[in-house]
Image (cartoon, rainbow, N blue to C red):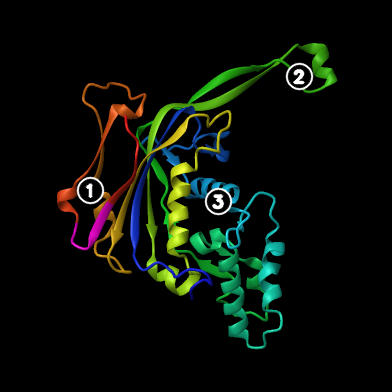
Amino acid sequence: MNNNYEQAINNRYDFVLLYDVENGNPNGDPDAGNMPRIDPETGNGIVTDVCIKRKIRNYIETRHGDRHGFDIYIRQNAVLNRQDQRGLEIVKDAKDKVEKSQGFRATMCETFFDIRTFGAVMTTAARDPSLSNIAGQVRGPVQLSFGCSIEPIIPREITITRMAVTNEEDAKRKENEMGRKAVVPYGLYRQEGYISANLARTVTGFSDVDLGIFWDALIHMFDDDRSATRGKMALRELVVFKHDNPLGNAPAHKLFDLVKVLRNEKVAVPRKYSDYAVTVDMEKIPTGVTVDRKYQDSV
C-alpha cells in the first residue's frame, strides 16, 4: 500500500550515525539510578534505539506537526486508545473484516509519521473482534540498533547544591539541599540503522518525502533537545549507503565494517571529536551501492 500523497521508496538504505556527548548523560538507565547506560562486560556506553526515536519524534512534531500526515502517535501524554479511534472512525461502516483492517492500517500510516516510519503496536485494534490480526501491529521500514560508545566510558556522579529546600520543615533544619548529577566526561557513540523498501512499499507507504524529512531529523535531533544533563550533544557524521534495488546489493554488516573510527595516535584520553579519525573505505564499496556522507562535521 502507498500513502495518498507520495510514492513509497524503491531503494534499500543502511546508515551509520556518529554523535558525541561532553559532560552529559546521553541516555540514563532507570534501573541504575539514571546513571549513563553501560555494558557491564566491556565498559562501553549504550544508547537505546528508543532514546533516538524519541528525539526524532520530538523534532518531527516540532518542525512538521501542523502538516497533514506528520502527527506523532507515540508522544508525551498521548492516550493511545484515543489515537486509535482516529483510524477506527474512518472504517466504522466497512462490512468486510479484511477490508476494514486494511483501511484502518492505511489510515493510521497516512496520519502518523512515526507509524509510517517505525511501525507500532495498536492495542485497541488488536483487541477489536471486528478487525483481523493485520490491523493491530504494523512493522515499520526504519529500524535502529543500540548505540555503543567507541571506547569504554567512565561515568561520574557530581554533587550539586540547590539553594532552596523542599518544604517548611526542611527550612527549619537547613538552608539548602544537595543533589547528584551523573555525566560522561566525553564519549563518541556509533549507532547503525536500516531502511527497508519492501516494508515501505507493502506495509506503511514510507515515501521519498518522508525519507528526506527523516534524514533532516537525524541531523538536527539534538538541536532542540537540550537539558541540564544533555547540554552538549552533537551529531558528527551520518553515512548513508543506498542500494540500487529494493532488496539491496550487499549485507548491511559488511557495509558498516567499511566505516572506521580510530583514536588518533597521540591522544591519551579522548575529550573531543577531533581526537578521532573517521574514514570510509570507498575502494571496497560493492557494485550497486552508493555512499553519501550526508553529514560530516568539520573539525
Mark 3 element type: helix
Mark 2 element type: loop
Q: Amino acid at mark 1?
A: Leu
Q: Which numbered marker is on residue 97? A: none
Q: Amino acid at mark 2?
A: Val
Determine whether 28 is above or below 136 in the image. above
Query: What is the quadrant of residue 70 in the picture?
Result: bottom right
Q: Nearer the viewer, mark 2 or mark 1?
A: 1
What residue is shown with label 1? 258
Determine whether 131 is above or below 117 in the image. below
Residue 7: x, y in percent? 44, 70
Determine whether, in the image, residue 244 is placed left or right of residue 171: left
Foreground of the two, 152 or 248: 248
The alpha-carbon separation of the residues under discs 2 and 1 comes to 54 Å
Mark 1 element type: loop
The alpha-carbon separation of the residues under discs 3 and 2 comes to 38 Å
The alpha-carbon separation of the residues under discs 3 and 1 comes to 30 Å
Q: Residue at x 61, y 66 (%)?
A: 122
What residue is shown with label 2? 165
Q: Label 1: how many residues lie within 10 Å, few (<14), some (14-19) or many (20+)?
A: some
Q: Residue at x 53, y 27 (%)?
A: 182
Q: Amino acid at mark 3?
A: Ile
Foreground of the two, 17 or 40: 17
Q: Residue furthest left?
A: 283
What residue is shown with label 3? 60
Q: What segment is highlighted magenta in the picture?
A: 286-291
Determine whether, in the image, residue 142 is placed left or right of residue 67: left
